[in-house]
Image: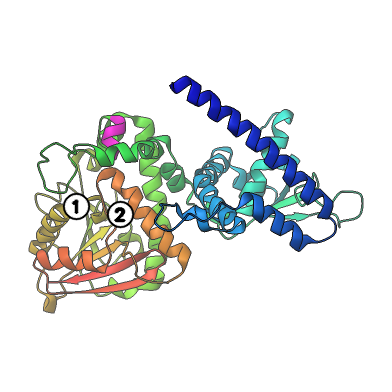
Amino acid sequence: MGSARGSSLQKYQVTHHHKLSSHLYKETHSIWWADKSSEAQVLNKYWRRPRPRSGTACSSADEQPVPSLLDAQLELWHHTLGYIKAMALKAALDLCIADAIHHHGGAATLAQIAARVALRPSRTPCLRRLMRVLTVTGVFSTARQRPAGDGGGDDEHSDDASYGLTPASRLLVGSPSLSPFLALMLDGAFVSPFLGLGAWLQQGEHEQLPVPEQPSSSLFEMAHGKKPWDLASRDPAFTSLFNEGMVADSSFIMDIVVKECGDVFRGLSSLVDVAAQAIYNAFPGIKCSVLDLPHIVANAPAGTDVKYIAGDMFDSIPAGNAIFLKWVLHDWGDAECVKILKNCRKAIPFREEGGKVIILDMVVGAGSSDLKQKETQVLFDLFIMFVNGIQRNEQGWNKIIYNAGFSDYRIIPVLGVRSIVEVYP
């Protein structure tokens, strides 16, 4: 019975499709060049789904006109292909395309880029397509070297097109460069876990977890069988990638911190810099100590005025006028953050004596209301979930700050997607 029913249904579908196509062709062909409004009526007649009778179920697409359906499809395709944009940027980093353009004085043809990055001639058409994505998405700019109409064609990506650096891609060359940090973010070790995000969210659904509402293992652990810190300690290549990425980010953001938030550090006599090393160069008058794990301190540079202390911020933090936490607390859940902050509280003097904790991190919703900033903040919040971390909004920061025994705080949202948070005992 099932086979006969399937056969009948298949015959009906084929016949119905043939009749529909035939009628649609006849009606649209006769009025195609005569009346566009009539054309729309015919298309709507055959392709718009009938409204269901009252009381019957329908999907949201049933009542949408064709243009709305296509807009909705475009929205889904745009999201689906979003990873291609990220991989195009990764290819640009791998090939050092920004450096190739910079080598030619800030503007280079496709042939010059191909030669500089050592591509085979057969790959040049593919490089053109890559550059088209990178220019449409704003990583690079493009301009024709010859005016249109001179025989060179009108395509801005023709052979004589010149590619240039934009404000974004200028951050990929020179010093400080964000290339190492972006290379880290786009590395397969960080990207591949998100292919299993849905499975990870369902993981342990029927298990008794040790901490309520806290996954037993991270997304990274599910994909690689170990934490990123463990991978870094065992894989020299990943260790180098990780360290270079963190140094690049620190160099970039701390230059801006000094310019925009220098008053936060002025007047301090001593500062403990937890897992970062950027303050002393900007404020040599401050006695700086760097707390980090023993294997990091073992490789710390010698012959500097910065004191390196081997330890663990979960056990204790050395005493100082202020504690600086850059890009640290977003890696940890609330309980761990409260523990770190309590140790900070023990290490600093009273507020009247200048004691405070300075946090450089993201405050979701703070700063500009620009859609790109808001989207970047929530995307980074989802990204940091790969280590069970979280990017907090002000309510989240308020919770852990007061639970750690502090009396007040101040958010300074002048660092783009990130902010300075001053926390007072």
Give how far across and how far down residue 213 sits, in percent.
16, 49
**Dot 1: element:** loop
Give how far across and how far down residue 417 sits, in percent.
39, 63
Q: Earlier in the sequence, mark 1 or mark 2?
A: 2
Q: Residue at x 56, y 54 (%)?
A: 69
Residue 234 occupies quadrant: top left
Position of 168 relative to 386 (above/below): below
The amino acid sitting under disc 1 is: Gly
Asked if residue 343 lies left or right of residue 125, the reply is left
Query: Which quadrant: the N terminus?
Result: top left
The main secondary structure of the magenta stretch is: helix
Magenta region, residue range: 219-224
Q: Residue furthest bottom?
A: 352
Residue hosting label 1:
333
* Residue 277, numbered circle: 2
The amino acid sitting under disc 2 is: Gln
For label 2, count other residues whose C-alpha is less than 10 Å away and answer few (under 14), some (14-19) or many (20+). many
